[in-house]
Amino acid sequence: MIHFGPVELATSPHVMTPRATSLALVDRVVEHLAGRAGLVADVGTGSGAIAIAIAKAAPNALVWATDVNPEAVELARSNAERAGVAGRLAVREGELLEPVPGPLDAIVANLPYLPLAERHRHPDLWNEPADALFAPGDGLGIVRRLLAAAPHWLTPDGIVVLQLRGQMVVRRPLVEAAA
């Protein structure tokens, strides 16, 4: 078991170990919701850490979490039950936003963004599953696909919050310009 902010989580070798740097994503989404009801999607949920932390911190929100990895989906469901948020957090297996209803007030993701060819330069990440961090080409293909899909899923004031070696907040007009 590990702690991600106030949340205790089980992990597995099939998902990336959640890091405290991702708590900034949670804070940004919770700030955007400002206590109101909202629909949030956590794409590439892994252990469910981000989705669960949002559900705990924003009790009026409904959260959907997606992952292509069936082991991650089962782990995230188990962690949501343990955290007591399974009634407001739906975990689904699927690509990006496919399993999620819209419109969304926020999309949050910590997707692979490092070039697979550069894995040898990151020995600190060798114990993590490669597909959680590294992707073909420049590493950003899946991020580009999410940004291209986002305008079709977001409410007019919806946001996309991505972790790319830090935090990046993209408001809807910028997402449309990037698509």
Image: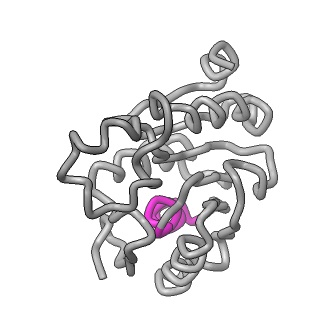
Main secondary-structure element of the magenta-colored stretch: helix
Outermost residue on the top side: it is 177
Highlighted range, magenta: 47-59
In the picture shown, does residue 45 fall above or below 82? above
Point out the image quarter for the N terminus.
Answer: bottom left
Of residues 162 and 87, the one nearer the viewer is 162
Point out the image quarter for the C terminus.
Answer: top right
Please say whether residue 91 is one of the residues in the magenta stretch: no
- Residue at 46% x, 54% y is 131
- Residue at 74% x, 29% y is 151
- Residue at 35% x, 51% y is 22
What scheme was used to colour the molecule?
Answer: one colour
Q: Left of 144 or right of it: where is 2?
A: left
Quadrant of the image occupied by residue 127: bottom left
Name the spot of residue 68 as percent of width and height, x first: 63, 60
Of residues 57 and 82, the one nearer the viewer is 82
Q: Left of 129 or right of it: where is 29?
A: right
- Residue at 65% x, 69% y is 91
Name the spot of residue 43 as percent of width and height, x first: 59, 52
Q: Left of 20 or right of it: where is 28?
A: right
Name the spot of residue 59 as percent of width and height, x first: 56, 66
Quadrant of the image occupied by residue 178: top right
Name the spot of residue 14 as percent of width and height, x first: 44, 71
The number of numbered discs placed on residues in the rendered structure image is 0
Outermost residue on the left side: it is 124
Of residues 127 and 73, the one nearer the viewer is 127
In the picture shown, does residue 108 fall above or below 8? above
In the picture shown, does residue 78 fall above or below 59? below
Please say whether residue 51 is one of the residues in the magenta stretch: yes
